[in-house]
Image: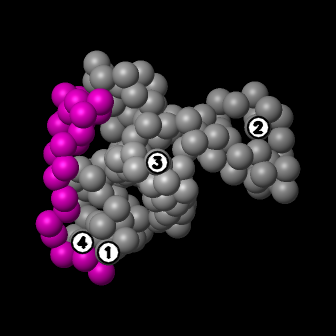
Amino acid sequence: MVKIYLAGPFFDKFGIEARRVAQIKALLECNPTVDAVFSPKDETDQDPAIQKLTPMSPEWRRQVFQCDLDGLNGADVLVVIADSETNLNGSDDGTAFEVGYWHARNEWQRAPQSLPPLPVVVVAQEAERLNLMLAEATTYFTDQPLELRHLNFEQIPVRAYQGPVI
């Protein structure tokens, strides 16, 4: 069973992105090949040490940053929600950072040993196009979130993104 890091935007003022994250997380948690799902929004909101800090203070920011890095480092698969209410090219700043960090982690930790890269699963129902960097980092692309409930995360097939890029 695998551990998943769930990346995606959740900051829009209407809560659409946060609901999307919750829906994708619920689908992943129903998947029998998934052991755990790390969602930065949920993990930092529930961390007792972070809850004691003043939001956006320097110490809070350091703790949230480290919590998210620990989640990335402990995951086997990165699942990216590429739908954003404010950015039509399939990402937000935090998600872009997480994908870049994931790629660098693959390069530094896995490539020297000739191990296959850790997979990136991208889910996009509404994105009109993806940023080229996100599109090229994708191992498995779907525009059908329900696929996540039955996808074998222990043996993810390659299914590249085929749409337009920016």
The Cα atoms of the two marked residues, 2 and 4, are separated by: 35 Å
Residue mark closest to the camera, 2 vs 3:
3
Task: Name which of mark 2 and mark 4 comes first in the sequence.
Answer: 2
The Cα atoms of the two marked residues, 1 and 4, are separated by: 9 Å
Q: Secondary structure at mark 3?
A: helix
Which SS type dominates the magenta stretch? loop
Task: Identify the residue shown where x is 23% and y is 50%.
Answer: 140
The Cα atoms of the two marked residues, 1 and 2, are separated by: 34 Å
The Cα atoms of the two marked residues, 2 and 3, are separated by: 36 Å
Q: Is residue 53 above or below residue 124?
A: above
Residue 154: within the magenta? yes
Q: Which mark is residue 50?
A: 2
Circle 1 is placed at which residue position? Answer: 132
Circle 3 is placed at which residue position? Answer: 113
Mark 2, residues whose alpha carbon is within 10 Å: few (<14), some, or many (≥20)?
some
Amino acid, disc 2: Ile
Q: Position of residue 26 (x, y in %)?
A: 35, 29
Task: Name which of mark 1 and mark 2 comes first in the sequence.
Answer: 2
**Which is nearer the eye, 60 or 165?**
165
- The quadrant of the image that shows the N terminus is top left
Task: Name which of mark 2 and mark 3 comes first in the sequence.
Answer: 2
Q: Which residue in the rendered view is the most extreme toward the top?
A: 32
Q: Position of residue 78 (x, y in %)?
A: 41, 45
Region rendered in magenta = 142-166
Q: Position of residue 3 (x, y in %)?
A: 45, 30
Task: Identify the residue shown where x is 33% and y is 38%.
Answer: 24
Q: Secondary structure at mark 4?
A: loop
Task: Identify the residue shown where x is 64% and y is 36%.
Answer: 45
Residue mark closest to the camera, 1 vs 2:
1
Q: Position of residue 47 (x, y in %)?
A: 70, 31
